[in-house]
Image (cartoon, coloured by chain):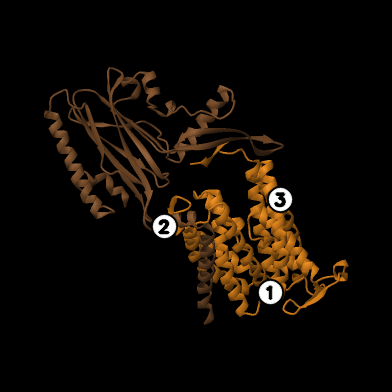
Amino acid sequence: MDIYLPIAEVSVDVFVLLGLGAAVGFLTGVFGVGGGFLITPLLIFIGVPPTVAVASSANQLVGASVSGVLVHWRRGNVDFKMGWVLLAGGLAGSVLGVWIFTLLKRLGQIELTISLSYVVLLGALGSLMMVESIHAQLRLNRPGVQRRKLHHHNWMHGLPLKARFRRSKLYISALLPVGIGFVVGVFSAILGIGGGFIMVPAMIYMLGMPTAVVPGTSLLQIIFVAANVTLLQAYTNRTVDAVLALVLLVGGVIGARVGSRFGTRLRGDQLRLLLALMILAVAAKLAFDLTVHPADLYSIVVDKT
Amino acid sequence: MSRGSAERCWGADKSVFPPSAVADRARCCGFCLAALILLSAPAHSQPLVADLTNHLIAITTGFTGASVVLFGAIDGPGDVAVVVQGPDREITVRRKSRIAGIWVNSRKVMFANVPSFYFVAASRPLEEIISPATASFYRLGVTNLKMEPEGMTPTQVVDEFVTALVRTQQRARLFPASVAKVSFIGERLFRTTIDFPSNVPTGTYLVQVFLVRDKDVVSGQTTPLVVSKVGLDADVFGFAGRQPALYGAIAVLTAMVAGWLASLPFRGA
């Protein structure tokens, strides 16, 4: 059954959209990443114009992360204090990010910059997480070996403005989450995503948050980042297709529900290994696309009507 | 469901808009009648009359593309050619080349007057019925679209980019892969079906019908055709354009409410 999307100006199969929403919702439920880096290329693949795909998946992300946060909140797995602190840094970072984006756009080759930063960022993150979780797996399989401490004390713990984050069982400087939020904000503005896949590993490895609290807290700040992007895109580019976002959401609901059930059954280190694999797969696909001979060397863009 | 419009003229009818369908059929029968009268009319009357079964393609939520039948009559032996063009668009064509192992957009050419949709049909192969100069003048055939690049670009490069542009548009089904058939019923009545894909651009289209004799156009008729969003889709599109800030806010709120509703079933679990 086909449905015509008023802003995208194409008709697509409703069931394809629902399936897409469900798949991404599943990831949201399991890992607490929004899945924007996955849904946007898939939408473009089924014929939605790239600008509409980016903007509408941000809109979809708002709904998906609201439901995710509520679900995690009921289980007591959201650290609100940490979320607000991260968000403060994130909003400041996205202002700088939008400025860099505009600059890159003026210089040309914005698409290439986006693809290359994805490959570098995802490749590095994925490899680090992969190595760490394999080590963790090996340690578990070898009985008698003592578990290491969650994190070591280093320069980060000497920073001022220390605050207690009870849910995360942390007593660290507030400057740390603000800084992480800022860096993620910069990247998410440039790459047009919620930033969950950078935020989640940073929360686990840099802040040392317990894995269980990470998805809910990450989604909390994604709500606001995605809402901000949706508003900006709707206002400046008029590329938000609310109908598309709603259909994706309906699928996403089912996926997220299954996903968060699945997520609670996994151990923290298994979850991290799966996330690492997924991030590496996306990086490999992007790197492959950059180097393989394109099917058609030419591409067209409709500038004005 | 708009596909049904192809059959509308000929009786088998499953229409989107009942009232206009009735009107269409009435108009259609009227034209068939006019065509019959024309057949018996003296030779000095109009040499060519033609009309469409439908002058409005309405894009609704269930839109999957549409077909419109063009029909008409001519006053004596001859050939008929049809051209349909959508509103002009400005299109940039980019070519990738390999730099340090990575494919990068390297060269671009901008075309200011590319028809957003193009369709051509003829009763016989174009080169058999019309001279190249005339075909070029009336933009008959994809090769005669005369798309001019902006700025200075060598002819050879322009040709390459035009070929790529045509190929891309053909893939999107906005340009035809070949010349469609205008079929004759007897010697004077003709018809052809124009297919529009679901990604058809909106706007006012021009449908031109030419009567061709001795390799030259002897008569022509132009009919407009409107492609427009109607109902909910038109409302959403219009609202997004007029009140972008409010539209964005509503989009965000709707998503939030949907997300909240989505989380409700978990309460019991």
Taking depth in this image into account, of B4 and B55 the one nearest to the observer is B55
The verdict on a common chain for dots 1 and 3 is: yes
Q: What residue type is labelled 1?
A: Val
Taking depth in this image into account, of B105 and B42 the one nearest to the observer is B42
The span from disc 1 to disc 3 (Cα, nearest Å) is 32 Å
Residue drawn at x 61%, y 62% is A228
Which color was chain A given? orange
Task: Describe the element under mark 1 as helix, strand or loop.
Answer: helix
- Residue B149, horizontal then vertical, whole percent: 54, 29
Q: For mark 3, name the chain.
A: A
Which color was chain B given? brown
Q: For mark 2, name the chain.
A: B
Residue A28 placement, left or right of B133? right
Q: What residue type is labelled 2?
A: Asp
Taking depth in this image into account, of B263 and A153 the one nearest to the observer is B263
Residue B121 placement, left or right of B75? right
Front tag of 3 and 2: 2
Task: Describe the element under mark 2 as helix, strand or loop.
Answer: helix
The span from disc 1 to disc 2 (Cα, nearest Å) is 42 Å
The verdict on a common chain for dots 1 and 2 is: no
- Residue A67, horizontal then vertical, whole percent: 56, 71
The verdict on a common chain for dots 3 and 2 is: no
Q: For mark 1, name the chain.
A: A
Disc ID at residue B235: 2
Residue B41 against residue A73 in the figure, above or below: above
Disc ID at residue A213: 1
Number of callouts in the render? Answer: 3
Residue A146 shows in this picture: no
